[in-house]
Image: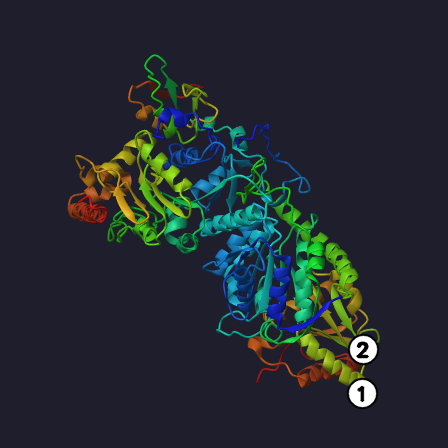
Amino acid sequence: MAIKDRMSGNEALAIAMKQINPDVVAAFPITPSTEVPQYFSTFVADGTVDTEFVAVESEHSAMSACIGAQAAGGRAMTATSANGLALMWECLYIASSSRLPIILACVNRTLSGPLNIHNDHSDSMGARDSGWIQLYSENNQEAYDNMLMANRIAEHLDVMLPVMVCQDGFITSHAVENIELVEDDKVKAFVGQYNPENYLLNRETPIAVGPLDHFTHCFEHKRQQSQGMMNAKKVILEVSAEFEKMTGRKYGLFEEYMTEDAEVVAVILNSTAGTAKFVIDQMRAEGKKVGLIKPRVFRPFPVDEMVAALSKFKAIAIMDKADSFNAAAGPLFTEITSALYAKGVFGPKVINYIYGLGGRDVKTNDIEFVYNELFKIASTGKVDSVYNYLGVRE
Amino acid sequence: MSSKKELKTVAIDVKWRDITEGGMIPYAGNAHLFKTGDWRSMMPVWNTEKCKQCLLCFPVCPDSSILVSEEGSMTGIDYDHCKGCGVCVKACPFKALDFVEESK
Amino acid sequence: MAYNLKEAAKRPERLTGGHRMCAGCGAPVVVRQILRAIKPEDHAVIGSATGCLEVTTFMYPYTAWKDSFIHNAFENSAASVSGAEAAYVALKRRGKIEGDTKFIAFGGDGGTYDIGLQSLSGAMERGHDMVYVCYDNGAYMNTGIQRSSATPKYADTTTSPAGKKIPGKQQWRKDLTEVIVNHNIPYVAQTAAIGNMKDLYEKAEKAIYTKGPAFMNVLAPCPRGWQYNTPDLMEINKLAVETCFWPLYEVIDGKYIVNYIPKTKLPVKDFLKAQGRFKHIFKAGNEYMIEDIQTEVDKRWQALLKLAGQA
């Protein structure tokens, strides 16, 4: 019997962490993820969890301590945003290459500069080559559910990679919405115990972690790391299937909303997908065949499945809440179009909208505008401009 | 504490599927298999007659190459690892270690 | 138990030969003694910052460490080991592991005085039961002898060369030991590998077996960077101590103890003359530099004695 409650996205993350009760949480505050370690500290202080909470002096130390703790044989978790994620940048790469299944809650906020505490995806997108599995969440429910599944995905022997669970800062992290929680004992049974074979605290077999790895062996280590990411897709689907059995909530690699007979679709990450669903419902009522694809798993990037899902549409708008500043297109656009091209799919016309940077509000008429543009492209077959900005004052 | 397991290492031509995950090595102390004795151009030679077993040479060796028995007596020099730095030679108060050119 | 070299020599060797440190390097000499102070039945988790010690002792696939070892990055040895210590506390509390494990983080002066200062400060402030050992060779040696805040004034390094216009490093050494004393941790020690290693060993033992954070700053001469012949290592260590350039002292729960006051304090130029990195200060016209250094050494030495009530 699920527990019906209502809470913010941050509180949902903290509750998930509480139920998982990891060995170590090492975190440093940064808006808008701050509440996560705050809530968790209350659990620690009240004895609701018996986690060792390490109030580190910076995010770089937060990830460093997580690496030390996970290598030692414990479960380590942290939470951060924006420049916090940026500050731990080198450690992200070390965590994944050392094959440490650390869990990080990334409450998406724009990277400085300029300084801005609001939501966009420049932080997690900036880390897309760090070797971390990335799961994106539309709302508090998805963030909570993704957190519950994260350890099972990360710690799978075929994967052994860290996982980043993303949700939009302020928009969902601070908004109170309804949620269905899973009972403590069910979470405990689902997440299970972390029992690594090799760990620093193993008295019988001491290990050394983090070598100087010359060109004689480094490439083999990186290839092996890459395999872990390739294996992750299957594992994510298996864990999600098991999660569905427990909760009735189904998760795949991405969500398809009203796509069966859609002519045009938008591809949107996180909370703006929710706005899009509202717009779709309205436009469908007017007989317009619009749809949405909302990626959940960005890393690993599900090439085959994404291409299969997109190939039938006449026009696609890929919405990026982050800019690559490459004078070409945003990150999601780049990944999807390269997948389409590599798989020989040239049918759909694909355009890019950079939107919502620095927390610029995304309104329903913005989404409507996008769909209307897509209909124009679908009927004329002409694309005037691929790389576009939505919502900026021109 | 000390692992009595036989020291193992990873082959230079190991394929990626077989390499140890994440660069982790579960063979503590296996550097002992790597010989650094060929770094020498000078070498210490132990003069057992002059040696008073003071053991002052033992801790000053950067390469743990002054061999000491379980009873606490110096028994010799590990030429597989001695790099010929000469620190032990100078540290010996009884001039019981000669410093000579490496004999090929 | 009073220190006895013979007894100590019977303990298992925790750093094997086969590492790639330069012949005559002062750092592994320091490390060997410190590790020997761990009780044979105790397990240890050792961390090291990127630097000479780390790249040479864990070069895939060889590890010279008989204990568990973790290297993470350059500036986070303290944070990484503090995380391992936190996991140990949690896992022990949950009954998942048994026995006593000691946590020792190593870092060079680069990874400790400079880039690693924040991480060290945080770990010490948080009260983790761990030891941080700085092996101070007075420059970023691993990357080619660049100046650090631990480099002595006037020393020739590759980023503070003794040039025609500027004669070496222009700043005084940072007193990191004092910085850490002011973190109010149970045990702080400054030591060096001299004589039969009694000072170093006993301080290591105290640091490792004092509950809570402990810090050791240990001189580690570098024959390449300091420009002296390799066999002179122990002589250089001795001169550093006898000239009071590198005082041997401890601060136990805030109380200072100067462990060694030389009967005859040698002039600092004896220490400087033995190293090629100071050869330019012995040129005619540069006498003021030696005087400068002597004044500063004396000032700091007197201040230390005063703190210890041993003036």
Report the amino acid beneath label 2: Glu
Which of the 4 quarters of the picture holds residue A143? Answer: bottom right
Residue at the extreme bottom: A286
Residue name at image x 54 percent, y 45 percent: A210
- Residue at the disc numbered 1: A286
Q: Is residue C50 left or right of residue C194?
A: right
Against C175, is B51 above or below? above
Image coordinates of residue A99 in percent, x first then y, are 61, 49
Q: Could you say which is closer to the camera, residue A192 or residue A375? A: A192
Q: Could you say which is closer to the camera, residue A243 or residue A19? A: A19
Q: Chain of mark 1?
A: A
Residue name at image x 51 percent, y 74 percent: A116
Residue at the extreme top: B49
Q: Quadrant of the C terminus of chain A?
A: bottom right
Q: Could you say which is closer to the camera, residue A244 or residue A164? A: A244
> Which badge, 1 or 2, is on the more N-terminal residue?
2
Image coordinates of residue C107 in percent, x first then y, are 42, 46
Query: How many C-alpha atoms fall within 10 Å of the one at disc 2: few (<14), some, or many (≥20)?
Result: some
The secondary structure type at the circle numbered 2 is loop
Callout in the foreground (1, 2): 1
Q: Could you say which is closer to the camera, residue A82 or residue C7? A: C7
Count of numbered tags: 2
Query: How many C-alpha atoms fall within 10 Å of the one at disc 1: few (<14), some, or many (≥20)?
Result: few
Image coordinates of residue A74 in percent, x first then y, are 58, 49
- Residue at the disc numbered 2: A263
Q: Chain of mark 2?
A: A
Image coordinates of residue C209 in percent, x first then y, are 41, 40
Q: Is residue A149 left or right of residue B70?
A: right
Residue at the extreme right: A261
Alpha carbon of mark 1 to alpha carbon of mark 2: how far?
14 Å
Report the amino acid beneath label 1: Glu
